[in-house]
Image: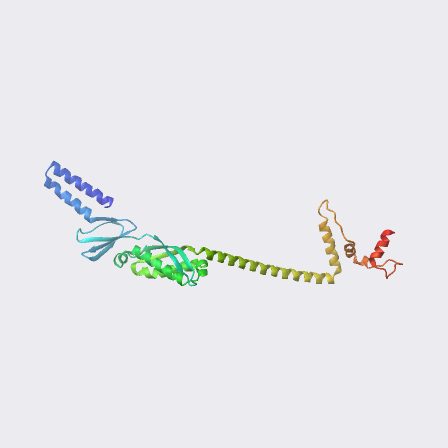
Amino acid sequence: MNPVTSFLVIICVIAGAGLAYWTNPYIGLPFLIIGMLIAMSLKMANAWQKFVILRLGKLQSVRGAGLFGIIPVIDNVIAVIDVRIQTTAFNAQEALTRDTVPVNVDAIIFWHVHDAEKAALAITNYREAIDRVAQTSLREMIGASMLGALLSERKEADQLLKDAIGRKTAPWGISVSSVEIRDVAIPVALQDAMSRQAQAEREKQARVILGSAEAAIAGKFVEAADTYAGHPAALQLRAMNIIYETTKERGATILIPSTMVDSLNPSAATVIPAGMNKEAPAPEVAWSKAAA
């Protein structure tokens, strides 16, 4: 009983009892009868409620928010439908995917009643029916999907479930807002195998990337060698730059081979001093000069 009806009934009962006590009992009796009629006929629906009313077994009306009255005994409120968005959790235990992998899937459905008349008259218990339909549709979707698609394509799976459940619940006056798969659990042994497979794939990709990088580096070295072969001065400048970079650190001792010094001045290295035997090898000439 709603607060307004309760207040009016209490007023009528108090008035009837007072009149019956202080005056004549028969004078207070009508107030008691009026209170009973108010309790049986005055109804109030909240903003989110729909009252389905039958009159002598036939649909009389569907009343919405506010106060309204019915005829006692003749009219009967058979259902009070909540039209707000509802949530129902459901799952599928040990369901087999298309590639015969057992999985446990948990999901949740968001739905609401858009036609209170159908929800009250077309089905006995629409809440229980939604739960059964959701579980059945989930198992059908799992059986038609591969494990990889079920794990990676969550949004597509959610949309398939929403459409499948919505088609079945539409005749009951129920609309499905969305379906969300919360968790897909697979056996531990399969998780280890998938982890090893993923690691192997990553190693393969890393080796491919490393090989591509080595090929690119080798190509650049070939281009540099061709450039230095045609321009000896560029090679000399590069060697001098390397020496400069190595001597930037303070307190560092750099040992430079004599061959490298000669490469820095190739024109001087190729000049043979006057009076020197042309047949003598270059190392002996360098040693005799040092001894002198």
Percent across and percent down for residue 104 are: 40, 56
Give the side of residue 284 with respect to residue 87, left or right: right
Residue lying farthest to the top in this orientation: 22
The residue shown at (33%, 59%) is 133
Residue lying farthest to the right in this orientation: 275
Give the side of residue 255 with respect to residue 60, left or right: right
Q: Quadrant of residue 222?
A: bottom right
The colour scheme used here is rainbow
Percent across and percent down for residue 195 are: 50, 56
Q: Nearer the viewer, residue 64 or 179?
A: 179
The residue shown at (39%, 58%) is 94
Q: Nearer the viewer, residue 183 or 274?
A: 183
Vertical placement of 85 versus 219: above or below?
above
Q: Nearer the viewer, residue 120 or 94?
A: 94
User: How many discs appear?
Assistant: 0
Percent across and percent down for residue 76 are: 20, 53
Q: Quadrant of residue 234?
A: bottom right
Percent across and percent down for residue 55 are: 19, 55
